[in-house]
Image (tube, rainbow, N blue to C red):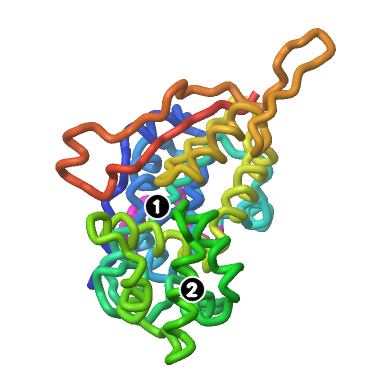
Amino acid sequence: MGFEHKSVLLFETVDGLNIKPDGIYVDGTLGGGGHAYEVASRLGENGSIIGIDQDAAAIKAAGERLKDFGEKVTIVRSNYCEMKSRLQELGIDKVDGIVLDLGVSSYQLDTAERGFTYREDAPLDMRMNRRGGMTAADVVNGYDADTLAQVLKMYGELDTTWKIANCIERARKISEIRTTGELVAAVAPCTPKKEEAKFLTKLFQALRIEVNGEMEALKMALEQSLKVLRPGGRLVVISYHSLEDRLVKNFFKSGNFDGKVEKDFYGHISSPFEVVTRKAVVPTDEELVRNSRSRSAKLRAAIKL
């Protein structure tokens, strides 16, 4: 199956960057290259965009999609949490805008063997970067029940996670849980029948976040954005669950992840950003019809001061 991904909030994202024709931009989550294509289309002869992704399939697909832009586009295989280092390697100190789309691509969800969805029986993998690192199977089989419960509570925002962890522990004592289907079967005794889809979505979300270190990577990327954005540069972030959105909202508000606003001697609020989106931008009804997977997307944008 070819790499297919419908860019979420495409024009809202690129409009939020307020593209300068000669500017330098970063797409830290390149995916299939949809946002990068629209950015590149608005750049002049001296403008450029650097696309970063850790997924080999995404890199290949985006390279094909963006090839006609020539040297205007540079693609780097890396995690966006390494953005500052990758830019330094390219001789770039400051940029005019950064976009981060934190969603899992349709390709990743629809490629069964990646293990991102409970709807298909497949190896319990969930790695964005398949070059190494722990898998979801390693988490499910290797974490003790208390740690597993903490992960499910923190990243899945699930209730009674100790019950879920105990279900998993009982199942793995009989046999290792190696596939998505086996995990679904393991948690069946504590799955609410009326909200099965919602429950399993949150369960798989929690494991994916843990496997890929997504929250820590996001924190690192946001902190690095302050260092690489020039004054007046813009940061646009699309999040898909409350944990991500809370981090982004707090960081835009205060420059830290707790959302604690610092004030100077005179009581003036000190923040490194001017928030552009007072309320999060969400998909239109028309977009939801075209792409139902965009339903949980929230876009926030800010200008570095």
Residue count near mark 2 (Cα–Cα under 10 Å), binned few <14, some 14–19, many ≥20: some
Q: In the image shown, does 259 or 264 lie closer to the viewer?
A: 259
Q: In the image shown, does 55 or 175 lie closer to the viewer?
A: 175
Describe the element under mark 1 as helix, strand or loop: loop
Give me the residue at 21% from left, 38% from top. 287
On screen, residue 233 versus residue 56, left or right, reads right
Give me the residue at 66% from left, 41% from top. 228
Amino acid identity at mark 1: Gly
Give me the residue at 60% from left, 76% from top. 144
Q: Quadrant of residue 182?
A: bottom left
Query: How far separated are the C-alphas under marks 2 and 1?
Result: 29 Å
Amino acid identity at mark 2: Asn
Find disc 1 in the rendering and name its residue.
103
Please tell me whether residue 10 belongs to the stretch shown in magenta. no
In which quadrant is the C terminus drawn? top right
- Picture coordinates of residue 149, whole percent (x, y): 54, 64
Q: In which quarter of the image is residue 125?
A: bottom left
In which quadrant is the N terminus drawn? bottom left
Find disc 2 in the rendering and name its residue.
166
Residues rendered magenta in the picture = 64-79
Residue count near mark 1 (Cα–Cα under 10 Å), binned few <14, some 14–19, many ≥20: some
Q: In the image shown, does 178 or 40 lie closer to the viewer?
A: 178
Above or below — where is 36 with respect to 199?
above
Describe the element under mark 2 as helix, strand or loop: helix
On screen, residue 125 versus residue 131, left or right, reads left
Residue 135 visible in the snapshot: yes
